[in-house]
Image: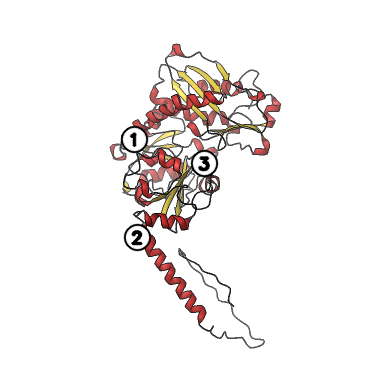
């Protein structure tokens, strides 16, 4: 569709949502894993505090940056209107993701202080040569799509020192204030949950179910945010879900949640359990803040967040696990979630919650210090303690983690299995019948239905 803003150099519209810009296609990128200082923030203001339509770039603009580089970025959107309230900030803020993706040749991923934006070479050649264009698009789209917003002012900051200053002094305190308010409620206190399909352009079968104790995977929308969004924009991407009958209070399964998720996922997801990462887990989009992953060698759970740049204890990076986790799939053993959910009373409660967690990046562990039970904090390993699963086993046993006895029992079983293999090898091999010349040997076909095979240990040795 043609750009609705006079003089805008590229198209704007939903057709570009979901566009991926690979590294070789990009002119520059902002945020992402290579950059520590990045954020986006919506601030609800009084009308006199907002200069409607103003767009300002503080720091080097697009053409002053070296092509192919990665840079800090802060986006502050000030909004005002008779119906604009502070409780709506998180909801309005989440739409930044959608609206920036409407711009031809611009890719936006994630939210809050995890944003990642790429601008394509093709769109720069077309004339998208200033960050002011992104600000203009945001002003236009917020006022058009969310007409209760009457005034919008956008500031884009690329100066590294200023991005860091606003991140620590303005953005993160605002995020934390929202989170504290969101976690004050319980799922049992309400009869309605909410669904969000903002990420379906990237994950077509993903339906985020938002409850008081299970915020959105991206961490940007709490139950309070979702309720406000559904009330102010009934036809928007956030909608009410009646809880209906509770089928399993521990796993968090509800009949009406199943029904609505099935409808909104085009029949691909028939059941969802909100508080587990195993059977019928909640789907994962791609904007999740962290990934919980199963470690079968210790029967425990590790969690890695987006900012961790090394390899987790299972030998995989966040990006490698994200490829197996996202896309709207229900992947047992890999589960996208928000950091706010890890502070919830219902955090993976069907799987043992914090008693099952065995590994975290040190930065995430420190960030969650108040949420982790005090008696478990020193028993959870980080990249500073262990570098592989064998070291993890020793650490958990030495620290007397709740899984320590189970790990010992598993090791005894493995040792016994190894002894049996050695004994079998020591015995002379039995004679193998040989078919007579010209005889027809009938193949054996084994068919199994509804069978799940779990291999605890597989040993393959060359026979001498």
Locate the N terminus and report the quarter of the image it occupies.
Answer: top right
Locate the C terminus and report the quarter of the image it occupies.
Answer: bottom right
Badge number at residue 301: none
Front-lying residue, 194 or 124: 124
Q: CB atoms at circles 3 and 2 under 8 Å apart?
A: no
Q: Secondary structure at mark 2?
A: helix
Badge 3 density bin: few <14, some 14–19, many ≥20, Cα 10 Å: many
In the orientation shown, which residue stands out farthest toward the top? Answer: 48
Marks 2, 1: nearer the viewer: 2
Is residue 111 in view? no
Q: Secondary structure at mark 1?
A: loop
Residue shown at 34% from the left, 54% from the top? 402
Q: Secondary structure at mark 3?
A: loop
- Reading the image, the residue beneath label 1 is 183
Mark 1 vs mark 3, CA separation in Å? 23 Å
Mark 3 vs mark 2, CA separation in Å? 36 Å
Rendered image coloring scheme = secondary structure
Front-lying residue, 63 or 273: 63
Q: Could you tell which of marks 1 and 3 lies nearer the N-terminus?
A: 1
Query: Would residue 202 appear left or right of 212 to someone viewing this image?
Result: right
- Reading the image, the residue beneath label 2 is 405
Front-lying residue, 157 or 412: 412
- Reading the image, the residue beneath label 3 is 286
From this view, report whether residue 104 is shown above or below residue 341.
Answer: above
From this view, report whether residue 30 is shown above or below residue 248.
Answer: above
């Amino acid at each position: 569709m043609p750009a609705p803003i006079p003089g805008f150099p590229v198209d704007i519209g939903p057709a570009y949502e979901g566009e991926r810009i690979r590294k070789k296609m990009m002119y520059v990128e902002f945020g992402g894993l290579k950059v520590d200082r990045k954020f986006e923030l919506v601030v609800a203001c009084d009308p006199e505090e907002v200069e409607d339509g103003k767009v300002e770039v503080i720091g080097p603009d697009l053409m002053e940056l070296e092509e192919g580089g990665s840079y800090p970025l802060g986006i502050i959107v000030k909004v005002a209107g008779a119906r604009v309230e502070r409780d709506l900030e998180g909801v309005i803020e989440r739409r930044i993701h959608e609206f920036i993706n409407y711009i031809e040749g611009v890719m936006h991923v994630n939210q809050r202080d995890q944003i990642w934006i790429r601008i394509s070479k093709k769109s720069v050649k077309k004339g998208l040569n200033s960050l002011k264009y992104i600000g203009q698009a945001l002003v236009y789209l917020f006022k058009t799509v969310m007409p209760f917003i009457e005034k919008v002012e956008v500031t884009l900051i690329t100066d590294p020192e200023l991005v860091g200053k606003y991140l620590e002094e303005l953005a993160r305190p605002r995020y934390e204030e929202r989170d504290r308010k969101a976690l004050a409620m319980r799922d049992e206190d309400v009869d309605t949950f909410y669904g969000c399909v903002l990420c379906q352009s990237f994950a077509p079968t993903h339906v985020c179910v938002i409850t008081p104790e299970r915020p959105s995977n991206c961490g940007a929308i709490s139950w309070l945010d979702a309720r406000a969004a559904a009330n102010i924009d009934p036809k928007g991407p956030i909608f009410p879900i009646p809880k209906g009958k509770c089928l399993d209070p521990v796993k968090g399964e509800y009949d009406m949640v199943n029904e609505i998720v099935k409808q909104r996922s085009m029949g691909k997801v028939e059941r969802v359990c909100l508080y587990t990462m195993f059977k019928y887990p909640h789907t994962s989009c791609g904007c999740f803040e962290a990934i919980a992953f199963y470690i079968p060698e210790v029967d425990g759970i590790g969690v890695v967040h987006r900012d961790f740049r090394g390899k987790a204890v299972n030998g995989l990076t966040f990006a490698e696990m994200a490829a197996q986790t996202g896309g709207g799939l229900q992947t047992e053993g890999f589960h996208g979630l928000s950091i706010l959910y890890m502070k919830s009373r219902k955090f993976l409660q069907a799987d043992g919650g914090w008693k099952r967690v065995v590994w975290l990046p040190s930065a995430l562990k420190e960030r969650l210090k108040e949420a982790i039970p005090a008696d478990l904090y020193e028993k959870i390993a980080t990249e500073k303690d262990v570098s592989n699963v064998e070291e993890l086993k020793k650490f958990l046993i030495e620290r007397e983690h709740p899984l320590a006895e189970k790990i010992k029992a598993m090791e005894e079983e493995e040792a016994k299995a190894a002894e049996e293999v050695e004994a079998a090898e020591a015995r002379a091999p039995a004679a193998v019948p040989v078919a007579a010349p010209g005889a027809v040997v009938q193949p054996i076909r084994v068919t199994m239905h509804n069978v799940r095979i779990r291999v605890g240990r597989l040993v393959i040795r060359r026979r001498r």
